[in-house]
Image (cartoon, rainbow, N blue to C red):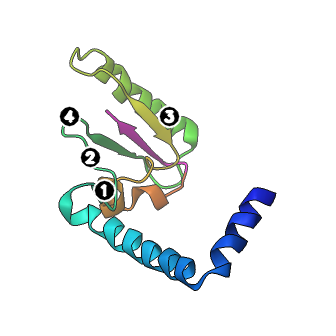
Amino acid sequence: MKKFENFIYWILKSKFRKMMVIILTIAAFFLSLLMFPTGGVLARMLPGKSANTYSIYVDTPTGSSIQKTRKVTNCITNILRDEKEILDMSIFYGQGIPLDYAGLVKGSMMKRTENLAEISV
């Protein structure tokens, strides 16, 4: 820590070194902004939905218990398990899947009730 403090004091003692730090900081800032248009960094607001995945929304009648929702969802997943093309499934009881574009549009990640489930295939 003492070496770092000595380095900072060394910079602050010279007007030239202080200006160089400011110039280098500003240059680094603008160079970092250039990373977006040049493709150095890909900027996305939300994770993209893969073309080979989809979501199934299970909406049982209002007031249904989580057990009834689970029973309906299990019937669907049992049918899906027989499909050889399906490699993986995630089931979310009482809530939507974590934030993605489809969930944002549908608002499923904000819903939290016992009569809802979502299957991500």
Badge 3 or badge 4: first in the primary sequence: 4
- Tag 4: amino acid: Asn
Front residue of 92 and 41: 41
The residue that disc 3 covers is: 70
Label 2 near label 1: C-beta < 8 Å? yes
The residue beneath circle 2 is 49
Most prominent secondary structure in the magenta stretch?
Answer: strand
**Quarter where residue 13 is shown:** bottom right
Which amino acid lies under the numbered mark 1 shown in the image of this protein?
Answer: Tyr
Q: Residue 101: which disc?
A: 1
Q: Can residue 1 be seen here?
A: no
On screen, residue 31 above or below 59: below
| Residues at marks 1 and 2, CA–CA distance in whole angstroms | 7 Å
Question: Where residue 9 sits: x, y (%)?
Answer: 72, 73
* Residue 52 disc label: 4
Question: Which residues are drawn in magenta?
Answer: 114-121
